[in-house]
Image: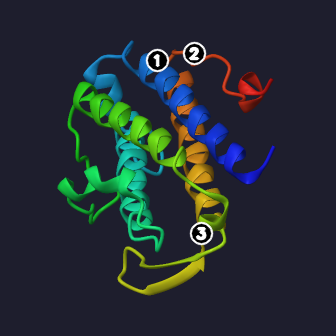
């Protein structure tokens, strides 16, 4: 499996897991989703908002890649998040709609990636405005690892709330 195939696998895993997490979250009441569970982003809803906002930040950065990824053009209509702890979506249904849209955008975009794109560096600014210059392939690893990390937190919070997300292993998607 080459690097492009691995990235495509991670995009598919991301979509699969988000569906599972959102299906599990939909079994809870709004109050249960908003309950402060002493997690880094407070609640289940806060954690899921962070993931959507974080993905938006990274995808908007990736849209500035020298390869000019036209598949990311729809992000131009969305403002850059300024606070990754902010509840940009106050209810699960609106957040789920954004999540579904983002996941499809990620899959569509990763299907346009080419091997030489991965070897370039990406110049961007972090959330504090500091300039950064990093290998694009490593940033993609961070992007998918960040999703997995915070989804792990969300699945723990869902389990504590009495909802089982089920199998979460990437292995389930590997032939």
> What residue is pinned by disc 3?
136
| Image location of residue 11, percent across then percent down | 57, 40
Q: Secondary structure at mark 1?
A: helix
Looking at the rendered image, the disc whose residue lies closer to the viewer, 3 or 1, is 3
Q: In this figure, which residue is indicated by the disc labeled 2?
A: 164
Q: Nearer the viewer, mark 3 or mark 2?
A: 3
Name the image quarter holding the N terminus.
top right
Which badge, 3 or 2, is on the more N-terminal residue?
3
- Crowd around label 3: few <14 · some 14–19 · many ≥20 (10 Å): some
Marks 2 and 1: CB-CB under 8 Å?
A: yes
- Is 112 placed above or below 24 here? below
The residue at the far bottom in this view is 131
Q: How many numbered marks, from 0 up?
A: 3
**156 vs 68: above or below:** above
- Lower sequence index among marks 2 and 1: 1
Q: Identify which residue, 10 or 95, lies in the foreground.
A: 10
């Amino acid at each position: 499996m080459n690097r492009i195939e691995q990235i495509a696998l991670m995009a598919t895993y991301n979509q699969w897991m988000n569906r599972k997490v959102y299906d599990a979250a939909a079994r809870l009441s709004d109050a249960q989703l908003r309950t402060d569970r002493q997690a880094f982003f407070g609640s289940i809803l806060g954690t899921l908002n962070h993931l959507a906002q974080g993905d938006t930040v990274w995808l908007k950065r990736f849209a500035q890649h020298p390869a000019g990824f036209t598949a990311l053009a729809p992000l131009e209509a969305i403002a850059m998040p300024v606070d990754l702890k902010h509840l940009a979506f106050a209810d699960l249904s609106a957040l789920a709609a954004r999540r579904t849209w983002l996941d499809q955008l990620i899959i569509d975009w990763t299907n346009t990636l080419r091997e030489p794109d991965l070897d370039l560096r990406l110049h961007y600014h972090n959330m504090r405005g500091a300039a950064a210059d990093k290998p694009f392939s490593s940033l993609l690893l961070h992007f998918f690892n960040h999703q997995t990390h915070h989804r792990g937190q969300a699945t723990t919070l869902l389990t504590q709330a009495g909802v089982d997300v089920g199998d979460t292993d990437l292995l389930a998607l590997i032939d």
